[in-house]
Amino acid sequence: MGLVHKDLLGLEELSKEEIGLILDTAEAMKEILGRDIKKVPTLRGRLVVNLFYEPSTRTRTSFELAAKYMGADVVNIAVATSSVVKGESLVDTAATLAAMGLDVLVVRHRAAGAPHLLARHLKASVINAGDGCHEHPSQALLDLYTIRARKGRLEGLKVAIIGDILHSRVARSDLWGLTKMGAEVRLCGPPTLLPQELARTGAKLVWQVEEALAGAEVVIALRLQLERQEQGLLPSLREYSRLWGLTTERLALAAPDVLLMHPGPVNRGVELDATVADGPWSAINEQVTNGVAVRMALLYLLLGEAGK
Ligand code: CP
């Protein structure tokens, strides 16, 4: 079985079986990452381009490493020094890259739907590296991989996602992925940052952080997206931290072997105390390592195995 899609645009459109296939493939890729020489020729001659219209450390770097470890050629476009600043459109930029032999375009854009537009225009595969507040599928896949690796399963796990749900593309992708894989999801945040329509996914929506944490086996804290806040959604950062910030005392309400995750970058002292971010329950750095394996698996499944 392979992926039925040309592109990876979101977890909403993936089946449980496809998600399982990606996680299983990432397992094999993790073995390559453990070798002294982390290089296989599988994608030799293929061209992967990273086109990021928003800042990134983890996603852009790990797609670059993943492509290099798989033997592909990689180009990173710095939008600020590209012809985008002369007014070149998104579609024209992608068409220019396609004319140079593009095989996979990894794109991050502030507008929800931007990767979907490109996927319709390009023969190459498009991977959504984050589109506005919509989806960030590769982050959710590395979250699922990390949870499955540490807990041995996803089915039936109690997972609390806490923070700025409204602006979080990670929360939306995690929600699709976790519910498809049978986890029990609680979403928690200030009422102004917790869209009620997400209840239709089967997730439980709670405002009180203590209720979300009670007995949770996995806690995913979200970055408070300061750059996307509109006036009036939050009283103040201090108030947010006081009511929804994770402290060691609050985390003690979760299961004794709770796994703490965060997509990064962390606002220390806002959504997480430093003692929580660096505590023994934290899988934050492990998520980053697993992100490379998951992205290798995605490139392999979209290009290598499909034999395009
Ligand atoms: N998690 C995540 O998307 O991080 P970056 O913004 O650093 O890529």
Image: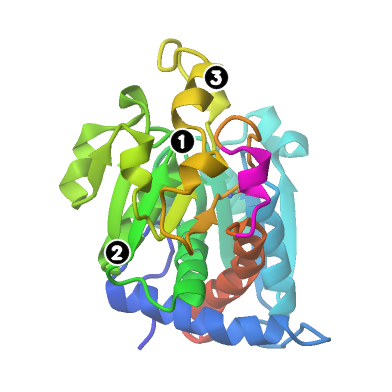
The spot of residue 148 in percent (x, y) is 45, 73
Q: Residues within 10 Å of mark 2 (few under 14, many from 20)?
A: some
Q: Give the residue type that dot 1 points to.
A: Ala
Alpha carbon separation for disc pair 1 and 2: 29 Å
Q: Is residue 154 visible?
A: yes
Judge by depth and name the residue closer to the eye, 40 or 216: 216
Q: Which residue is mark 2?
A: 183
Give yes or no for residue 160 being in the magenta stretch: no
The spot of residue 34 in percent (x, y) is 73, 84
Q: Is residue 44 visible?
A: no
Q: Quadrant of residue 90?
A: top right
Judge by depth and name the residue closer to the eye, 30 or 94: 30
Start and end of the magenta stretch?
A: 272-280
Q: Which residue is mark 1?
A: 111
Q: Secondary structure at mark 3?
A: helix
The spot of residue 150 in percent (x, y) is 51, 73
Seen at 57% across and 87% down, the residue is: 28
Q: Give the residue type that dot 3 points to.
A: Leu
Alpha carbon separation for disc pair 3 and 2: 31 Å
Q: Secondary structure at mark 2?
A: loop
The spot of residue 116 in percent (x, y) is 40, 51
* Disc 3 CB within 8 Å of nearest ligand 1 atom: no
Q: Quadrant of residue 14?
A: bottom left
Which circle marks residue 237 in the picture? 3
Q: Secondary structure at mark 1?
A: loop
Q: Give the residue type that dot 2 points to.
A: Ala
Q: Quadrant of the N terminus?
A: bottom left
Alpha carbon separation for disc pair 1 and 3: 26 Å
For the residues labelled 1 and 3, say whether their Cβ atoms are less than 8 Å apart: no
Judge by depth and name the residue closer to the eye, 123 or 128: 128
Seen at 63% across and 81% down, the residue is: 30
